[in-house]
């Protein structure tokens, strides 16, 4: 029985100590190279040197706005994590194109400007996203570039009621 | 009207605080979750986030956590299992306790849990099978996909599955994602599987498998397939394997899919193009294939044919489809029949849940707990989340959304004073101890995890799962 009462926390320290309740669910992703991730990891961010940043705003369905400092070369999932934005369940597969929880909606003009078109694999995953639109993308597949300064993206709510048919 | 409403609200607040301050061991609500799959973990995550006092105990039947993420998700889809990292974080929260090796309904009853916790959230998934109820279903080598999945994934109860792969044709009944998972495992080159966390004992059996052709059979048509596009694309690109799609099933579909919602449109388009207008690249990929998978439609299984002992084929009734809404057409049997010879039949027509306590209102027809948005019907303080409440449909994303939703509902009921704050978790733990139940903590799981990953690394795999309950318990309690 000993293990039950005296369990101590090992993993992310900040999640335990930060007073904000939200810190508990901020998708704190295990950034260590995971064996599970294998070769399929799509995240492109690397370099530890200070990088150029641009401002990108995430707007949730309930109106909450988060303005972030986004490092050029990072993807938008990295940006959410690095800026400690509390989005429930965002990035569940850690950027490996296997979950669609990083679904974002762009303005048509911004969508058209993105340098990389979505791959078939990204579109396949998007097809499972709730509230899919023609200008939907997966955040983990969008790479921040210099000309994105001032970009506003919408974070759609999960489905209002998963039980409705 | 307005001031009156305000007063009522205030009264509610006061009442809430009074109740909190005078009940049990202070005002810390203890709640428990039954089941440690995605539903259990995501519900717990939401509860811990929304109330900074609450304590969540997660009871799990098995000595190990994560439900279908460990025992369902295919070994060649490791990226899906990344959700485990978030679950681990939840389990390591100091207000969360994983209590493994406790079968609720057997080791401790629902009413006993109710006496110890402010709320009980049932997230125990859907562990039973749907059956066809046709003659011959119980002969040798008619295997449920659920058991086959459990077998290759190391689920203790399925580790000794009776299956014979010494046959060249396998028929899979059903065209959902589980059917595709099973087909892929049967057809993937063994060297690729050998680098996954598939159990070594099943890898050995698959290495000797003679299966060359897997036929997937749907009772309706291509517009009604239940699998999704990512999984289909993976099948089309499977190394050493060729798809066999019959052109007559797809002719004319191009004029229909154009107007369908995007997911169904892209899915149908991919089937259509693969069948009717394959590209050079496709041909190159398929030319040297030694194995194949085939899609058949409009066939309902009527009888499993056998030689007295073992399956030898399936007799199907030919269906016609009815209804003006093309995507939701229903199938109607005609007098025509067709028999397909094969040496292995895998039934993949869906899962169902079961009732763990006779007091639980249960919808027998759909195999789910009777509930409204997670509140179990007529049972105060009892909730359900995930497959046990929604039915066995959807991916982890859907289960996550449901888990969050139900978590929010519980928090709301707690806030509005609908629940009595009960904080007697120690009583539940003592009861288990008295009954000699050897519980497994998350720390104990870490020990198992370490051994499994080390064993895996030694043979070039991310993990070698231990499928023996006694072994798991020995490690946990060493
Ligand atoms: C074969 C298969 C493959 C899948 N692959 C994918 C995929 O690749 N991607 C994806 O997004 N989704 C996939 N899914 C769907 C996904 O697994 C489900 O959405 C999700 O697991 C449902 O979560 P759950 O918590 O409701 O149930 P489960 O994951 O089944 O968890 C239920 C838990 O409760 C425990 N339990 C049962 N009875 C008791 C009891 N009496 N007392 C205590 N504990 C109990 C069980 O041991 C289990 O740990 C797959 C499903 C299947 C069947
Ligand atoms: N990679 C992944 O993301 C993944 C992997 C595995 C599972 N999952 C998810 O897990 C859930 C469960 O998957 P599943 O494949 O078990 O279920 P499913 O998607 O519901 O598919 C069940 C299949 O069985 C057929 N069927 C049902 N009853 C039948 C009968 N009596 N006779 C003949 N056919 C019958 C259905 O046809 P009808 O449509 O005609 O009823 C359907 O084709 C799904 O939502 C799935 O997407 C996801
Ligand atoms: S994080 Fe899973 S698809 Fe982007």
Image (cartoon, coloured by chain):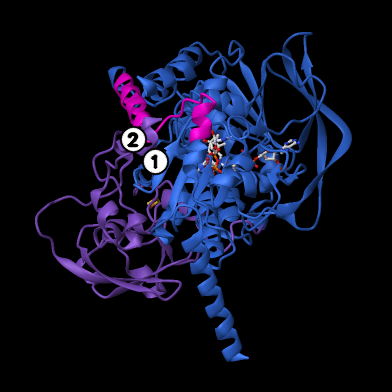
In the shown orientation, is residue B271 left or right of residue B304? left
Q: Which residue is mark 2?
A: A36
Spot occupied by residue B466 in the image (x, y as percentages of width and height): 42, 20
Q: Residue most toward the left? A: A49
Quarter of the image where one finds residue B340? top right
| Mark seen at residue B84 | 1
- Is A57 magenta? The answer is no
Q: Quadrant of the C terminus of chain B?
A: top left
**Nearer to the camera, B361 or B392:** B361
Q: Ligand 2 is found in which quarter of the picture?
A: top right
**Nearer to the camera, A33 or B298:** A33
Give the chain coloured blue: B
Of labels 1 and 2, the one closer to you: 1
**Above-or-below relation of A103 to B338:** below
**Above-or-below relation of B367 to A53:** above
Establish whether labels 1 and 2 are both on one chain. Answer: no
In the shown orientation, is residue B436 left or right of residue B127? left
- The answer to whether mark 1 is within 8 Å of ligand 1 is no
The crowd level at tag 2 (other Cα within 10 Å; few <14, some 14-19, many 20+) is some
Q: Secondary structure at mark 1?
A: helix
Quarter of the image where one finds residue B7? bottom right
Q: Chain of mark 1?
A: B
Q: Can residue B35 be seen in the rendering of this structure? A: yes
| Residue contact at pointers 1 and 2, CB within 8 angstroms | yes
In the shown orientation, is residue B3 left or right of residue B346? left
Question: In 3D space, how far apart are the residues under numbered discs 1 and 2 (Cα atoms)?
Answer: 10 Å
The crowd level at tag 1 (other Cα within 10 Å; few <14, some 14-19, many 20+) is many
Seen at 34% across and 33% down, the residue is B443
What hue represents chain A?
purple
Spot occupied by residue B417 in the image (x, y as percentages of width and height): 56, 66
């Amino acid at each position: 029985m000993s293990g039950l009462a005296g369990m101590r926390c090992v993993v992310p320290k900040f999640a335990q100590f930060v007073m904000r309740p939200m810190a508990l669910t901020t998708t704190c992703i295990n950034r260590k190279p995971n064996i599970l991730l294998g070769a399929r990891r799509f995240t492109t961010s690397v370099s530890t040197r200070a990088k150029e940043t641009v401002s990108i705003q995430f707007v949730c369905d309930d109106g909450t706005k988060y303005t972030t400092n986004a490092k050029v070369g990072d993807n938008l999932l990295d940006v959410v994590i690095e800026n400690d934005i509390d989005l429930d369940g965002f990035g569940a597969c850690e950027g490996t194109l296997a979950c669609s929880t990083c679904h974002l909606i762009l303005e048509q003009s911004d969508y058209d400007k993105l340098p990389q078109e979505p791959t078939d694999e990204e579109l396949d995953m998007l097809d499972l996203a709730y509230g899919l639109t023609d200008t939907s993308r997966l955040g983990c597949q969008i790479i921040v570039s210099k000309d994105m300064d001032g970009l506003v993206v919408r974070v759609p709510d999960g489905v209002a009621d998963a039980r409705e048919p | 009207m307005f001031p009156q409403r305000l007063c009522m609200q205030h009264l509610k607040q006061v009442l809430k605080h009074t109740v909190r301050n005078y009940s049990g061991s202070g005002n810390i609500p203890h709640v428990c979750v039954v089941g440690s799959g995605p539903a259990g973990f995501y519900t717990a995550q939401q509860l811990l986030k929304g109330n900074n006092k609450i304590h969540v105990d997660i009871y799990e039947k098995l000595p190990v956590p994560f439900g279908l993420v460990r025992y369902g998700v295919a070994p060649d889809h490791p990226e899906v299992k990344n959700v485990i990292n978030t679950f681990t974080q939840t389990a390591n929260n100091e207000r969360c306790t994983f209590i493994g090796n406790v079968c609720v309904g057997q080791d401790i009853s629902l009413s006993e849990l109710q006496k110890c916790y402010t709320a009980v959230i049932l997230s125990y998934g859907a562990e039973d099978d749907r059956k066809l109820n046709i003659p011959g279903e119980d002969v040798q080598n008619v295997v449920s996909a659920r058991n086959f999945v459990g077998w290759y994934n190391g689920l203790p109860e399925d580790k000794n599955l009776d299956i014979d792969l010494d046959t060249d044709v396998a028929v899979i009944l059903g065209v959902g994602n589980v059917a595709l998972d099973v087909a892929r495992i049967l057809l993937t080159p063994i060297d690729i599987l050998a680098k996954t966390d598939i159990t070594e004992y099943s890898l050995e059996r698959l290495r000797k498998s003679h299966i060359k052709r897997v036929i997937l059979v749907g009772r309706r048509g291509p517009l009604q397939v239940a699998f999704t596009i990512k999984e289909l694309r993976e099948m089309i690109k499977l190394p050493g394997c060729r798809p066999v799609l019959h052109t007559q099933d797809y002719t004319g579909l191009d004029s229909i899919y154009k107007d369908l919602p995007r997911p169904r449109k892209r899915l149908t388009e991919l089937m259509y193009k693969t069948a009717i207008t394959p590209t050079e690249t496709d041909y190159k990929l398929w030319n040297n294939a030694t194995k194949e998978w085939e899609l058949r439609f409009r066939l309902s299984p009527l009888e499993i044919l056998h030689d007295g002992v073992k399956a030898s084929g399936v007799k199907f009734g030919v269906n016609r489809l009815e209804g003006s809404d093309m995507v939701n057409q229903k199938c109607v049997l005609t007098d025509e029949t067709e028999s397909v010879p094969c040496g292995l039949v895998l039934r993949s027509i869906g899962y169902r849940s079961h009732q763990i306590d006779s007091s639980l209102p249960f919808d027998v027809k759909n195999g789910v707990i009777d509930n409204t948005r997670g509140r179990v019907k007529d049972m105060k303080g009892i909730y359900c989340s995930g497959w046990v409440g929604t039915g066995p449909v959807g991916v982890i994303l859907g289960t996550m959304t449901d888990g969050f939703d139900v978590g929010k509902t519980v928090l709301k009921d707690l806030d509005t004073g609908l629940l009595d704050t009960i904080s007697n978790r120690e009583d539940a733990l003592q009861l288990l101890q008295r009954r000699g139940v050897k519980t497994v903590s998350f720390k104990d799981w870490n020990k198992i995890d370490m051994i499994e990953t080390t064993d895996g690394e030694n043979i070039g795999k991310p993990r070698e799962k231990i499928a023996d309950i006694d072994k798991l318990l020995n490690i946990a309690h060493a």
